[in-house]
Amino acid sequence: MDTLRVKDRKVTILGSQRSAMGAARLLRHFGAQVLVSELDTDQFNAEKRQILADIGAEFEFGYHSPDVMESDFVVVSPGIPENVDIMKKIRSKGIPVYSEIEITSWFIDAPIIAVTGSNGKTTTVSLIHHMLKTAGYDSYLGGNVGVAASEVLLNSLLESPEKPIFVLEVSSFQLDNIESFKPTVAVILNLTPDHLDRYPTLEAYYESKIGLFKYLDQNCTAVINRDDPELSRRDIVAEHKRYFAVDSLSGADAMLAEGTLGIMDESGWRPVLPAKALPIPGRHNLSNALAAIAATMDFIQEPEILAQGLMTFAAVPHRIEYVGKINNIRCYNDSKATNIASTEVAIDSFPQPLWLILGGKDKGGDFTALTPLLESNVREILLVGDAADIIETQIGRTLPTCKLETIEHAIEYCLEHGEADDVLLLSPACASFDQFDNYEARGDYFRSLIQAREGWSL
């Protein structure tokens, strides 16, 4: 536990969202002098003011004072890009900049399993967490999944866990400012286009993801998806590698063979679970389950315990989550789909006639990629949010679209024009920040609208 790196040091935290507030608590706990500097006055509220006052942190909202430039190091929130003025000034002065995930790792003495990738992260970390708890470990789940890693660590310090493991979902933004982060097990699920509004090139985004492997040593294991074409073409440097695969003919350490999920190790092939027994549907979830098996193989050796964890797992909210039925139209919340590749996975899960709600804050994706998947079964694409015009321009000539102001209007339109056995799917392929604080708020709103309607049922 590296407390000397922060005790009595002057630290500025840029931003005041979830990870920033967690970092403030963590750094104050270990004796740092903390300044939370937030440019956006809309983020200021009495609750944050009270929290920061209670822990003895200084704060400023609506400006960045000269005190920022006197910091020993800066912790930057993942939502703040490199090209803003304050970041340019900090870089020009040579002040070290870290992500919240980096500084949290300084104080974790237990194994860390970290998962990144363009899609499937939340399901996979939730599955790993559940499997470890089933096996008797004191598993702590955090990061990009909803609770900041720093908050999870602080919560663990209040307990006396016998077998602690930290399972962290890690975004590319969090990996952009690491200096020594080396999880015990580092998992990359896949690489598909995303965040092209933030990175100058697609390759820059991919390199950010692969940065998860940058500091691994002989005590660490890299877990890689052998089916992913982008990962397969790269020469990933790691002393210990482990592969998982649904389709690969070259085999893997965790793989699907003759309809069964299993392990290939020094003992040979060991079956774990028939694929049809996995409680979360879709081929993509077979891949997520195999990633979870590969990630936990060092901690759970018994196939029957792996199987128990897989079989008792419940689906993650906001990821192809069934939320109810109205007029025999089944409604699904896939708000977690904030990029096009994730929406492709959701679309592929439904052969039924489909009403698809798309839109939000555009991230620079190519929506024409959805056209081949939708041509055969789409009823209509319901466009909402800031990206509605962009999406309509790209696919409106080949697919039926209707622009609507809000998600609520999209639901009303579907229920008015839909037929029994249709599917209404919220899978936006966009960020939520035009109308919502985050994808969870968007998904919760969609679910509440469905379940508030007269005649809805499960």
Image: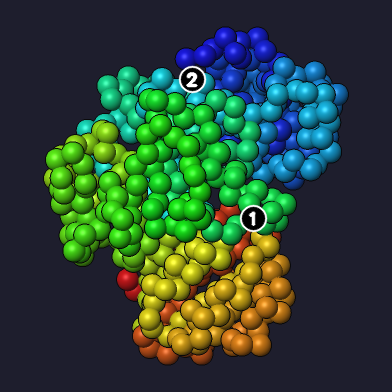
Q: Which residue is mark 1?
A: 202
SS label for mark 1 = helix
> What residue do we see at 71% from left, 67% from top?
386
Seen in the picture, residue 180 relative to 175 is either above or below; the reply is: above
Does residue 406 show up?
no
Q: Does residue 389 appear left or right of residue 415 in this picture?
A: right
Reading the image, the residue beneath label 2 is 107
Q: Is residue 124 above or below residue 246?
A: above
CA separation in Å, label 1 and label 2: 33 Å
- In the image, what residue occupies the spot 44% across and 26% down? 217
Q: Is residue 385 left or right of residue 265?
A: right
Q: Quadrant of residue 9?
A: top right
Q: Which mark is residue 299?
A: none
Query: Which circle, 1 or 2, is nearer the viewer?
Result: 1
Residue pictured at 82% horizontal, 35% vertical: 88
Inspect this view and state whether residue 417 appears.
yes
Residue at disc 2, secondary structure: loop
285 vs 311, nearest the viewer: 285
Position of residue 229 in the picture relative to residue 282 (left or right): right
Q: Position of residue 53 (x, y in %)?
A: 66, 23
What is the crowding at mark 1: few (fewer than 14 residues within 10 Å), some, or many (at least 20)? some
The image quadrant that residue 131 belongs to is top left
Q: Amino acid at mark 2?
A: Phe
**Image position, residue 86 (x, y; %):** 81, 34
Give the image location of residue 79, x and y in percent. Answer: 67, 44
The three-letter code of the residue at mark 1 reads Leu
